[in-house]
Image (cartoon, coloured by chain):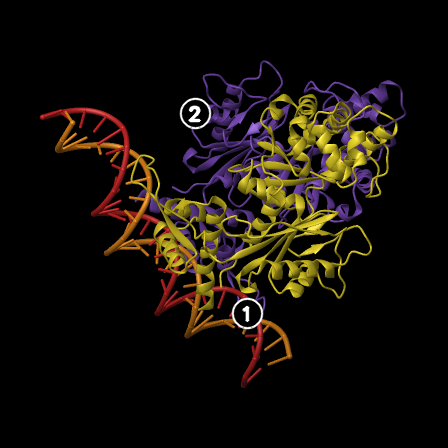
Chain colours: A yellow, B purple, C orange, D red
Amino acid sequence: MSIIVEKSQRLKADIIKYLYYKKVLSLTDLSKLTHKSLPLVTSVVNSLIADGYVMEQGLAPSTGGRRPLMFLINPDLKKYIIAIAMDQLTTRLTIYNLSHKMIMPVQLLEFVMTAETSNAGDLVAFINDCIVKSGVKKEAILGVGIGMPGFVNADEGVNHTYLKVGDGLTIQQYLQNGIELPVYIDNDSSLIALAELNFGEAQNMTDVLIVNIGWGTGLGMILNGKLYRGSGGNAGEFSHIPLSESNNLCSCGKRGCIQLDTSLLVMTQKAEQAVAHGIESSLKKLFADKTKHASDHFLEAVSQQDPAAVSILAKAAFQMGKGLATLIHILNPECIVLSGRGAKAGRMLLPPIQQAINEFCIARIAEQTEIKVSTLTDGAELLAAASLMMEHLQMD
Amino acid sequence: MSIIVEKSQRLKADIIKYLYYKKVLSLTDLSKLTHKSLPLVTSVVNSLIADGYVMEQGLAPSTGGRRPLMFLINPDLKKYIIAIAMDQLTTRLTIYNLSHKMIMPVQLLEFVMTAETSNAGDLVAFINDCIVKSGVKKEAILGVGIGMPGFVNADEGVNHTYLKVGDGLTIQQYLQNGIELPVYIDNDSSLIALAELNFGEAQNMTDVLIVNIGWGTGLGMILNGKLYRGSGGNAGEFSHIPLSESNNLCSCGKRGCIQLDTSLLVMTQKAEQAVAHGIESSLKKLFADKTKHASDHFLEAVSQQDPAAVSILAKAAFQMGKGLATLIHILNPECIVLSGRGAKAGRMLLPPIQQAINEFCIARIAEQTEIKVSTLTDGAELLAAASLMMEHLQMD
DNA sequence: ATTATCTTTTATAAAAAATTAAAAAGTTTA
DNA sequence: TAAACTTTTTAATTTTTTATAAAAGATAAT
């Protein structure tokens, strides 16, 4: 009998997931999305209404026939998701309800991944602290979604680069034990791709590349309509493809990696060198302010159209465009979305990237892919982490 | 009512397709492959036996439980597939039954795609001639599968590079009208990928890249277990990624395309130049024989380990390896298969490719992908063309 | 302008089909 | 000879189809 329940619970979870993503849907919409028949969907939605998960919203305008009754997730539902977005230096956490509402301001933890002293225990303590501070009961929390840099195998729950824990435990298991809630982890770039697919520029597309411009240059891929992770979960390592003309040594131990030209870190370093060499620029003043990270100042200068900063950015963007030209030939996507922290500079990034693509792509191929800049705000990573949790939602 | 029929006919076609690929299967196997329940599969297989399509083979050895009854396609079934493999110079045709048996020797047509005088009408005449010659009745032919070079959109039935026909018709429609049978076309590299997936080195894998070493260097991709074609059907244009150090002009109008270093045509040209410059090599004698194409002589010299030929090949292979290093970073496949005409030289190709991958890939990523040489013989393209037809099989 | 008819879309109830669960029938292994 | 496993068959349950009704807008006739 438990298996019967399990299967109908699967459909319940799917319906909640779709209502979470799309916010308001009719029974017909849900039937199409879940590939289940209308009578079945109707009965499951009715049971979800009885359980308090779902509400009727009222009739939508007609599209030429009978007006459909629309449904949405009960905005007063007391169920929550913990969303965590990590980067090399900082970890951000917030708690959402199922109506995309933050019920707690974003909490920050200075957690330096690369540091020897960094300990996964600190992360557990931080998360538990936040739960206590929020006043939300643990039973009301559906789970924890975490996006992090590194070679992450989402299925196995392992990060091969950072956050290693002993005792034969995966970081996922370690966190799960520590906070006693379901925990799901994934690579930050894959998650941003998920966010663009569900909420951003990649909606309703089946073949899209999402470039995560940040400390490195990550890549998330939606292929045949779903996130592609590769055989070992390590697809999308755009940062280290051999394309750079500089002969510098990359952190990975190789030479010629593209990120030696394109990463935000390298751009910022070049800007700092330029300032040190006495270039005339607003960067000089900005870099003096140590309250924010230099890369934030660099992005700020770019959006202020500081010539020195824009010139550094344009060179990097051209190289990135050359790399993207390769991807366009291989994957023939309908769209490439520039996303992540660096997308702030998107408007400045676009012309040199487009130029490189025109120069290195066969016209027939290039004209099939549109280059877009993400419109998701800073919250993209957190939203994506919440999505990750919703992807794994289970009803009990 | 016709829709009821249509759905059960879909399952019938799927079952025949799987029996075609795997040759012998039990009901349980078929149930798993088709994702349909055992009782349903049982009843459909019984109806296929009644129709004469399928036969019982007998009991297979036990795997620890009750011995399964195995089924296969009736080897005396009078249903046939026309398989056509085209390259720039030559078109090959054969007719298979559903037990992979050629019921007619391979027929050749000198059809030069690039020539102005080439006319799709000649192709129609050739196919119709072959049908007459074979003595097979048209009603017994399930359809025609054709693999061809160029920018092919398989869904739309268009080749944007070659075989253009007027009157607003696609080449697929033109051929279909001319021979009055269902016709399916696809890019040669995609088809070779399909052949490797179903019959060759990529069996039971979900993320594999198949390199078609031929006139150009094509790429077929199996991602998430299925052939990836890209948004416009033009994925896999490996030939023209910007990676060459030579500054020669490519046929596509750009400079720096990888195929300027790696295509069989370029290798052969280099060998001819070397001979012209008086290099000591068995190639000199071989090239004098004009009955075969120079590239065949070149491949022959390579397999005879002629030093000059091997040296030219090794340089090309290293460049190809550098390109593959990029793909490995992006797609993290479990395997790369070297296939197509040039795979004959596979054993010679492997070391320089592996060396380039080791030099340009992060070790963690590189060690996850195995490089293999195809074991499919010359018939790969024809087998693949037959597969293409079977993918579209419809029961009526 | 009002009414009637037609088309399109959503909702529900009865009939048909497919899946799942359970039982039965063979095989191998301990 | 029982226990573990796998395939096959049967019975029960679930799910999908199909048919029908109801609602809304568009078009045409009165």
* Side (left or right) of A83 relative to B366: left
Residue A154 image offset from top left, x and y in percent: 65, 53
Look at 68% across and 22% down and name the residue there. Answer: A355
* Side (left or right) of A126 relative to A364: right
Kind of residue at disc 2? Asn
- Observer-nearest of B31 and A207: A207
Label 2 secondary element: helix
Chain bearing mark 1: B
Counting residues from the start of the chain, the first of labels 2 and 1 encountered is 1
Kind of residue at disc 1? Gly
Do tags 2 and 1 sit on the same chain?
Answer: yes
Spatial distance from mark 2 to mark 1, Cα to Cα?
Answer: 53 Å
- Observer-nearest of A257 and B354: A257
Label 1 secondary element: loop
- Observer-nearest of A326 and A297: A297
Name the residue beneath numbered marker 1: B65
| Image quadrant assignment for residue B345 | top right
Circle 2 residues within 10 Å: few <14, some 14–19, many ≥20: few
Residue B135 image offset from top left, x and y in percent: 47, 33
